[in-house]
Amino acid sequence: MSLSQPRDIYGIHSVTMYNRSNYQPYGILRVLGNSTLNITGETISLQGGSSPYDWNVQSGAITAEMTLNFREYPNFLFQVLFGADPTEAGAASATGEVTTLTNVNGTSCQDATTGIASVGIESGENANLKFTKYIVKAVSATTVDVYAMTNVDFSRGTDKEYEDDTLKLTSTPLTIPGTGGTVSLTDYGVEFTGGSGTVDMTIGDTAEFVMKPPYAEDTEILVGSPDACIPQFGAYLAAQKQGDGTMWTIDAFKVTALGFPLGMQEKAFSESEITAKLSYDAAEGGIFRLRRVRPSAGGCA
């Protein structure tokens, strides 16, 4: 009788993270790089006297770690690894959207009576909305300069450029009219509505808002809340199906991991890697379960 075919594992297909309480999946990772399950043990040696060798060796602590390399960022990752709560827009927006103007320094920039009452989208200018955070700065009692945090979307609609290295957009300050009048930031689709009374802002005060162009998807994730709760989770890994149909899975019952890097490399897709700890699950009686199936039919041949 000849030797049997060696059992090998090829590639990686997916990693599913799931809730340990009810086993409901959080979601699946498919764009994966090199990922490894490492089981390493410590050995305790008995040494003494003139012997250059150990008198005895016994097993010490065993550490189980899982390294996951992924190249996609679904919302559930931020929930599971940061304890964050991603917010998705309920529907696509054909018009775009602007966030509420909020004071940053001082209190006079955004004021319903004596400052800028609100910021909105200029009628008919939706195609010119550029995605960035805007900063409004009072440069006199009635005028403001406007700045943009990035020019990544300045080619949308009418091409625009910064005025100078301060990232200012206004060649001359905008005059904010009183009694509810409006003024626009040309070719940005931004419209400011003045307060209901006489405008009287404090020089140097600032406010901020974010403009979003018409969008198909819109996600916002606040990371680092003191109320964040980072859960332990289960992880179900599947190796790539082989040509003869052979499949391997690893079910890690109790996994702990905190955070992940958000890389932005030059001319490259972002890639993150985490090292997660596996611990004993009393209900399952172990730390993970490994399964291998080679179907009687279903391979490529």
Image (spheres, rainbow, N blue to C red):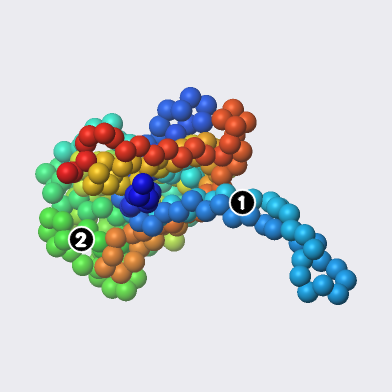
Residues at discs 1 and 2 in contact (Cβ within 8 Å): no
Looking at the rendering, which quadrant does residue 76 occupy? top left
**Along the line of sight, which residue is nearer the eye, 39 or 228?**
39
- Does 80 sit above or below residue 140? above
Task: Give the Cα separation between the discs numbered 1 and 2.
Answer: 51 Å
Determine if residue 57 is in view: yes
Mark linked to residue 63: 1
- Does 94 sit above or below residue 33? above
Looking at the rendering, which quadrant does residue 186 occupy? bottom left
**Which residue is labeled 2 in the image?**
154
Mark linked to residue 14: none
User: What residue lies at 35% left-to-right and 63% top-to-bottom?
Assistant: 264
Identify residue type, mark 2.
Phe
Give the crowd class for mark 2: few <14, some 14-19, many >=20 residues within 10 Å. many
Q: Is label 1 in a helix, a strand or a loop?
A: strand
Q: Is label 2 in a helix, a strand or a loop?
A: loop
Camera-nearest label, 1 or 2: 1
Q: Quick check: 149 left or right of 60?
A: left
User: What residue lies at 33% left-to-right and 59% top-to-bottom?
Assistant: 270
Q: Earlier in the sequence, mark 1 or mark 2?
A: 1
User: What residue lies at 27% left-to-right and 47% top-to-bottom?
Assistant: 242
Rendered location of residue 30, percent (x, y): 31, 46
Rendered location of residue 86, percent (x, y): 40, 39
Determine if residue 199 is in view: no
Q: In which quarter of the image is the C terminus?
A: top left
Q: Quick check: 133 left or right of 188?
A: right
